[in-house]
Image (cartoon, grey):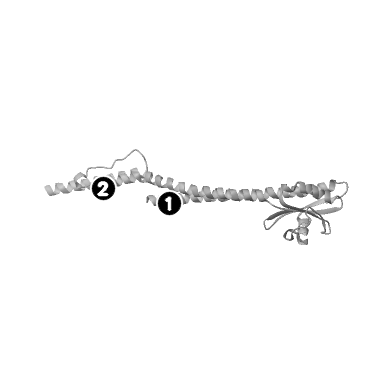
Amino acid sequence: IKFKIAMLFTVLVTLIFLLLGTAIYYLSSWNRKTEFSQRLRNRALTTTRLLEELEEINKPLLKKIDSLTMNLLFEENISIYTDMNELFYSNRSAIPEPLRPTATMIDRIRKEKEYRFSVGKYEGAGIIYHEGTNNYVVIATAFDQTGRNALQQLERILLLSGVAGVLITMLVGYFFSIKLLRPLAQINTEMNEISFQNISHRIAVTNKKDELNQLAITFNSLLERLETSFNNQKSFIAN
């Protein structure tokens, strides 16, 4: 029964660890996605505004400026499309095929004003930028290497902490069960020592109002009835 109590205690604590770990990981993942999407949106707006601020549209200069800040986002790609869905600007000489937006995606961005998506390991954000009579579609994609590495590190920490917590819980649960069952073992020992030669012996009780103390009182009451019956039988035989 000690092992069963320890295992039950371990299972309950493990379930709590599992729920807490899952909640922490889910919230951290959600926060990473939200924060990275906001960074993508800001990068898209910054590039477009910088392009607008130039007195003359100097795309090579803007690409040079973008290259100086490329380390802000890993494998970053920013592209701007005109009302005719034609590529107006890209900070890369060639857009990788998986990241090349379709006409359907561009139309969806125009309809929803802001659209967030993911393609494989890349995440992206598309927004509408108004400049005079032009409505540009700006799409920014990148790979959140730092965020994903931090999430993997968190996953390893949660896993190791969970395993360590389960092992500690098993040890604590086992010693807790020993302490919990010690009064019951003492009652059992005293019961085994009682015989017809010392039927007047009673199990020690305390002032605690718990189940074990109540059990001892019940045993003592049973012993009193047995002693009374035994004495009556002896008296009957003697007479």
Provide the secondary structure element on which disc 1 rests. Answer: helix
Task: Indicate which disc residue 219 carries.
Answer: none
Q: From this viewpoint, which residue is outermost toward the left?
A: 239
Q: Nearer the viewer, residue 75 or 217?
A: 75
Q: Is residue 125 rendered to the left or right of residue 170?
A: right
Residue 176's x, y, as percent?
A: 40, 45
Provide the secondary structure element on which disc 2 rests. Answer: helix
Q: Which residue is mark 1?
A: 7
Task: Indicate which disc residue 192 carries.
Answer: 2
Q: Quadrant of residue 79?
A: bottom right
Residue 226's x, y, as percent?
A: 23, 48
Q: Nearer the viewer, residue 96 or 136?
A: 96
Q: What's the residue at 37%, 46% (across, down)?
A: 178
Q: Is residue 45 visible?
A: no
User: Badge 1: few (under 14), some or many (20 or more) residues near its Cα, within 10 Å?
Assistant: some
Q: Quadrant of residue 92?
A: bottom right
Q: Is residue 238 rendered to the left or right of residue 28?
A: left
Q: Earlier in the sequence, mark 2 or mark 1?
A: 1
Q: What's the residue at 40%, 52% (across, down)?
A: 4
Q: What's the residue at 27%, 46% (across, down)?
A: 191
Residue 238's x, y, as percent?
A: 12, 47
Label 2–label 1 contact, CB within 8 A: no
Q: Nearer the viewer, mark 2 or mark 1?
A: 1
Q: Nearer the viewer, residue 59 or 11?
A: 59
Q: Is residue 5 visible?
A: yes
Give the residue type at disc 2.
Asn
Q: From this viewpoint, which residue is outermost toward the right?
A: 56
Q: What's the residue at 49%, 47% (across, down)?
A: 164
